[in-house]
Image (cartoon, grey):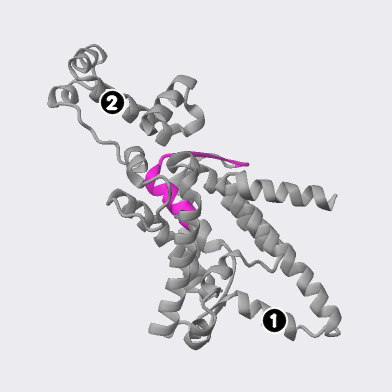
Amino acid sequence: MMNSLWEDFKYNIAKGTRLNQVLLINVSVFIVILFARIILNIADGGNPEAFNLLTKWLSLNTDLSFLIGHPWILITHMFTHIGLWHLLWNMLMLYWFGNIVGDLLGDQYIWRTYLTGGLSGAFLIIFFSRIFHYPSDIVMAYGASAAVMGFILAATVIAPDYLMHLLIIGSVKLKYVALVVIVIDLVGIAEQSNTGGHLGHMGGALGGILMIWWIRQGIELFPGKNTNTEVRGKIIPIKKSIKALSETRGNTNDTSQEVQKLNPGQQNQEEIDRILDKISAKGINSLTEEERGILDKSSK
């Protein structure tokens, strides 16, 4: 059994989607920490000091001298979860919004969004804690919440009218989901309830917004095999239609006549724009096989 689990783990890490990789690494780190906690508690007679020290070495710390001496915590904190419900909620949110970002931007942007959100959340916590001394105490933070907020806002900036189908509530536009989440964090900051965590969430949200802005500007923070040229074409459709086409867009007959005057590249761009508008309004699952083929062909 253990050998089979290990083989599945290696396969998903090596060949799985990037979203599956992020989810699997978070869960694996949680399991390792769980066993470490059990072993340390047994070895130390139930004294939590050893485990608290381990948690400190993995968590973000606003003590700059500690941060400089333990720079890895800028990364490890966003994969560290102690409580089961904390892990489950973050992974559920990550799965929902990670799939949306993957549909809209492409799988290659999952890790970039995760790291951008997590690092920007860490920066905002440190900035407010050290520069403005708010809160005045040293803050420790861990979890994927800031990275998840990066996914929520990145998806919202690209497709604010994307429909999410929520249990009990029904269909809700993504922009309203993001608004509710942001208001909750602002209320938490105002009430000084888990201030560091809520600041991290806001930092992650800012990171998601900035990442999409950077893509639009042609800036690549975490360059990979695929440059952002393809993605820019998806999230910033270039309207090359002539003025006559714009004026007759509402008239089906006139529009088709004008489209025929355009060259094949322009016709293709118009079709891509229409498909992207449909994704924004109804989600990628609303596309027909033909529309998916057109989008895949244009991305190549």
Residue at 25 percent of width and 24 percent of height: 265
Q: Residue 7 — which label?
A: none
Residue at 37 percent of width and 42 percent of height: 231
- The total number of labels drawn is 2
**Horizontal side of residue 214 vs 207, given as left or right:** left
Judge by depth and name the residue closer to the eye, 217 or 164.
217
- Region in magenta: 150-168
Q: In the image, is residue 17 part of the stretch drawn in magenta?
A: no
**Horizontal side of residue 288 vs 274, given as left or right:** right
Mark 2 highlights which residue?
270
Give the quadrant of the C terminus.
top left
Q: Residue 52 — which label?
A: 1
Secondary structure of residue under mark 1 = helix
Secondary structure of residue under mark 2 = helix
Callout 1, which amino acid?
Asn
Lower position in the chain sequence, tag 2 or tag 1: 1
| 3D distance between C-alphas at marks 2 and 1 | 58 Å
In the rendered image, residue 76, in percent from the top left (x then y), is placed at 58, 69
In the rendered image, residue 284, in percent from the top left (x then y), is placed at 48, 33
Residue 59 in view here: yes
In the rendered image, residue 190, in percent from the top left (x then y), is placed at 46, 73
Residue at 83 percent of width and 53 percent of height: 2
**Horizontal side of residue 51 vs 62, given as left or right:** right
Judge by depth and name the residue closer to the eye, 213 or 188.
213
Callout 2, which amino acid?
Glu
